[in-house]
Image (cartoon, helix red, strand yellow):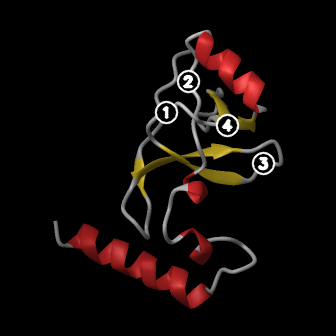
Amino acid sequence: MTFSPKATKCMACGAAIFFCRTKNSERMPVEFEPNPNGNLAVTPQADGLPEAVVVRPGQAAGMRDAGLLTYISHFAACPMADEFRRKARHKQTVDTYRRKATQSKGNR
């Protein structure tokens, strides 16, 4: 099974991301481009939503040595990440970003 994630854009910063499922079945945004310092192993799943597993630094280095790609969570790179974290999320702020994203799609 080849891995080709479905790209989308972050509602806050506009960066290219894709979503994965964690071991707890939570959805997590991941940077679209592989990262040479990444700590996530991403594997395709039959249902189309890839699974992301956090790996230790030694494991990540071994993966890269073997030619496998590693990724980082978008939460680590997004300047607006705190707005989307569960504990700090403000419904009004998230709704604002969603409205802006929907409006910009309508202007195309």
The residue singled out by tag 1 in the image is 34
| Amino acid found under the numbered disc labelled 2 | Leu
- For label 4, the crowd category at 10 Å Cα-Cα, with few meaning under 14, some 14 to 19 and many 20 or more, is many
Name the N-terminal-most of marks 4 and 1. Answer: 1
**In which quadrant of the rendered view does residue 13 lie?**
bottom left
From mark 4 to mark 1, how far is it between C-alphas?
A: 10 Å
Percent across and percent down for residue 73 are 60, 49
The amino acid type, in three-letter code, at marker 1 is Pro
Residue 84 at x, y percent in the picture: 60, 72
Q: Position of residue 56 (x, y in %)?
A: 78, 32
Q: Which mark is residue 20?
A: none
- Comparing 100 with 82, the one in front is 82
The answer to the question of whether label 3 and label 4 lie on touching residues, with beta carbons closer than 8 A, is no
Q: Secondary structure at mark 3?
A: loop
Q: Is residue 35 left or right of residue 46?
A: left
Q: Earlier in the sequence, mark 2 or mark 4?
A: 4
Q: Which mark is residue 39?
A: 4
Label 3 and label 4: CA atoms lie apart by: 18 Å
Mark 3 vs mark 2: which is more N-terminal? 3
Query: Residue at position x 23%, y 72% from top?
Result: 106
Q: Secondary structure at mark 2?
A: loop
Tell which residue pokes out farthest to the left in this image.
108
Q: Quick check: marks 2 and 1 in contact, CB under 8 Å?
A: yes
